[in-house]
């Protein structure tokens, strides 16, 4: 049994590899290499699994799930510049794929009474990355 709850956060990012020249960065990352970055309204679908409790009719208390994801992820990333305000993406780029792997590490093993099964992170309506821990 799986259940999914949707979360939202807004954050800015920039793709820039300091080991490359400005020209190489522009070639590789195009507009995403701009000095100040740009923002996205991210949509995060958190899917958890667990046995259905016949008494409650639930696999997880959604209030607890919401509180955990808000504490561990949304508070951390909402209204942040992912390159400059935290160290989570040092040595890499805060791409949709990399962010979803980082969020997995923040949540895995820390959800109340359920297992993290899948994350889907939308950067826009047309682009999302999905991760199941491998
Ligand atoms: Ni972007």
Image (cartoon, rainbow, N blue to C red):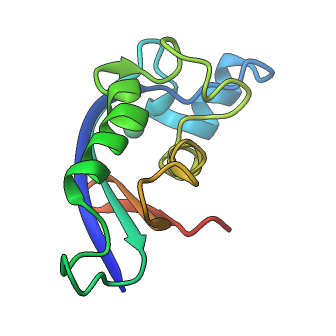
- Give the left or right position of residue 72, taking residue 97 as reference: left
Q: Quadrant of ligand 1?
A: top left
Q: Does the rendering let one see residue 87? A: yes
The relative height of residue 4 versus residue 94 in the rendered view (above or below) is: below
**Which corner quadrant of the image does residue 3 belong to?**
bottom left
Q: Position of residue 109 (x, y in %)?
A: 58, 54
Residue at (38, 28) in percent of width and height: 77
Residue that appears at 70% across and 25% down: 17
* Residue 97 on image: x %, y %: 54, 53
Viewer can see residue 125: no
Viewer-side residue, 19 vs 102: 102
The correct choice, above or below, for 38 with respect to 54 in the image is above
Q: Is residue 72 left or right of residue 61?
A: right
In-front residue for pair 28/76: 76
The image shows residue 28, relative to residue 112, as above or below, that is above
Instruction: Name the quarter where the N terminus is drawn.
Output: bottom left
Say which quadrant the C terminus sits in: bottom right
Residue, x 28% and y 62% (percent of image)? 126
Q: Going by the picture, which residue comes out furthest to the right?
A: 19
Work out whether residue 20 or residue 14 is closer to the camera in this orientation and state it: 14
Q: Position of residue 103 (x, y in %)?
A: 51, 45
Number of numbered labels in the structure image: 0
Residue displayed at 66% across by 23% down: 23
Q: Position of residue 91 (x, y in %)?
A: 74, 27
Q: Which one is in front, 23 or 1?
A: 1
As displayed, is residue 101 above or below residue 131?
above
């Amino acid at each position: 049994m799986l259940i999914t709850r949707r979360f939202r956060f807004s954050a800015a990012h920039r793709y820039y590899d300091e080991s490359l020249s400005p020209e190489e960065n522009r070639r590789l990352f195009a507009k995403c290499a701009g000095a100040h970055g740009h923002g996205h309204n991210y949509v995060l679908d958190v899917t958890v699994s667990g046995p259905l409790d016949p008494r409650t009719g639930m696999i997880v208390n959604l209030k607890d799930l919401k509180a955990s994801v808000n504490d561990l992820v949304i508070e951390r990333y909402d209204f942040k510049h992912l390159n400059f305000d935290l160290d989570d993406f040092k040595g890499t780029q805060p791409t949709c794929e990399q962010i979803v792997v980082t969020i997995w590490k923040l949540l895995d093993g820390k959800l109340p009474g359920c297992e993290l099964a899948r994350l889907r992170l939308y950067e826009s309506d047309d682009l999302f990355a999905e991760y199941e821990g491998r």
